[in-house]
Amino acid sequence: MSRRYGAPVSVPIRPATSILVVDDRPDLEVLIGRRRPGSVFVGGMIVFPGGGVDPVDHTPEARERVPVGQVPGLDAIEAAAILHAGVRETEEEVGLDLAGPGPVDPADFPHVGRWITPVPSPRRYDTHFFLGRYRGGEVVADQIELVEVWWERPRATLERIETGDLEAIKPTIELLRSLSAYRTVAEAFAGTGIGGGTRHENGWTSF
């Protein structure tokens, strides 16, 4: 919560989504991006591709590509808009089309977590996280939201965070910890159906 002229001003919470893109190289690696330094939100930190849910994610064209989604506590249409946003933002930020022309099968993008930005923060997001397979294509940072993007084993990324080589917020760290338990993409996807995960004050992971 921020203040203006001595009165508290609420920071609105915006719906958002992010996709953990994984590939066997030959061990499981995840696509990591570095946010543009100076960004209002998590500037210079590492993130997974993603962003806010926009009106375009609710259009008939979006429904043709992603007819339904699977998100705990949400109906299939609302979940579809959230998943579409993740697919769209991934293509915009790193150049990867994870879905093709559609229709998307929600089973290809299992929901793996939800985190809400705590206060105080200049921007707050209610972010849903999905797991998605790399389906080919060149990875290129858009140089607008992300200035760098690379593949890395989750455990190696965690080690770099611990040494101070990389910076990340808690949701990113917790999802990396979940991924680090798996050796292959197939194992990670199988893990999403087992349950478990961890719960924290501002969010949770489910695999």
Image (cartoon, rainbow, N blue to C red):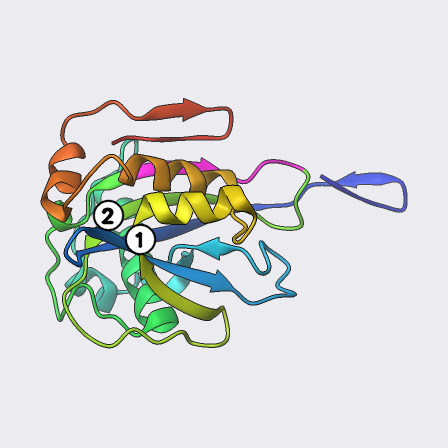
Disc 2 designates what residue? 131
Decide which of tag 1 and tag 2 comes sooner along the chain. Answer: 1
Give the extent of the magenta segment.
112-119
The residue lying at 36 percent from left, 72 percent from top is: 92
**Residue 160 position within the rendered picture, expressed as x and y whole percent measured from the top left:** 46, 49
Front residue (pair 205, 9): 205
Query: Is residue 125 visible to the viewer in this orientation of the structure?
Result: no
**Residue 75 position within the rendered picture, expressed as x and y whole percent measured from the top left:** 25, 38
Front residue (pair 54, 199): 199
**Residue 164 position within the rendered picture, expressed as x and y whole percent measured from the top left:** 56, 48
The residue lying at 9 percent from left, 44 percent from top is: 186
Q: Residue 19 carries which label?
A: 1
Q: In this view, does 173 lie above or below 101?
A: above
- Under mark 1, the amino acid is Ile
The residue lying at 44 percent from left, 54 percent from top is: 47
Task: Look at the numbered discs 1 and 2 and tell me whether their residues touch, using CB distance below 8 Å.
Answer: yes
Q: Is residue 58 above or below residue 80?
A: below
Q: In which quadrant of the rendered image does the C terminus lie?
A: top left
